[in-house]
Image: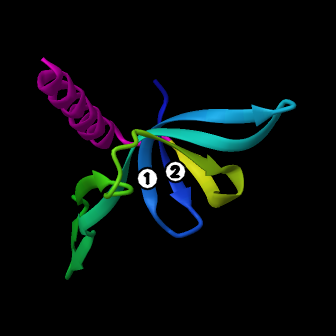
Amino acid sequence: MSIKIALLKSGEQVITDIKEILSEDKPVGYLFKDPETITVNKPFLVQEDIIDHSVEVSLSSWILLTTDREMVVPSDWVVTLVEPIDSVSKMYEEKVNGKDREVSSTED
């Protein structure tokens, strides 16, 4: 599993398990598995000599109205890929693992 945050041309920040798609050894796109949009709910605050570096984030399905768990994204739509901080990575893994448990429990 390679969890990354992809910054897209649209400005969206998507955390996902990502794999590069190659054609003739050249990257042409990415396979996003279980992509989640990152929303910053509380930005940094600066008030008279007090700086609050804490940030609140939430995750939501990148494309809400689909049951697909894998999506192909052309490489020219990805501006950059970065490593998420540990707390966001953990949040993502917990959410994705919760989806896996929900799916398997309804199949019984």
Cβ atoms at labels 1 and 2 below 8 Å apart: yes
**Residue identifier under label 1:** 14
Distance (Cα) linking label 1 and label 2:
5 Å
Q: Name the image quarter holding residue 98.
A: top left
**Residue identifier under label 2:** 6
Q: Amino acid at mark 1?
A: Val
Near mark 1 (Cα within 10 A), the count class, few <14, some 14-19 or many ≥20, is: many
| Residue 67, position as x, y percentages in the image | 33, 44
Q: Where does the magenta region start and end?
A: 83-108
Near mark 2 (Cα within 10 A), the count class, few <14, some 14-19 or many ≥20, is: many
Q: Quick one: which residue is furthest to the top in this view? A: 108
Residue at 43% over, 41% down = 16
Tell me if 99 is positioned left or right of 1 in this view. Answer: left
- Magenta segment's dominant SS is helix
Q: Secondary structure at mark 2?
A: strand
Relative to 104, is 70 above or below? Answer: below
Q: Amino acid at mark 2?
A: Ala
| Residue 48, position as x, y percentages in the image | 20, 82
Residue at 49% over, 29% down = 2
| Residue 29, position as x, y percentages in the image | 68, 44
Residue at 65% over, 34% down = 20
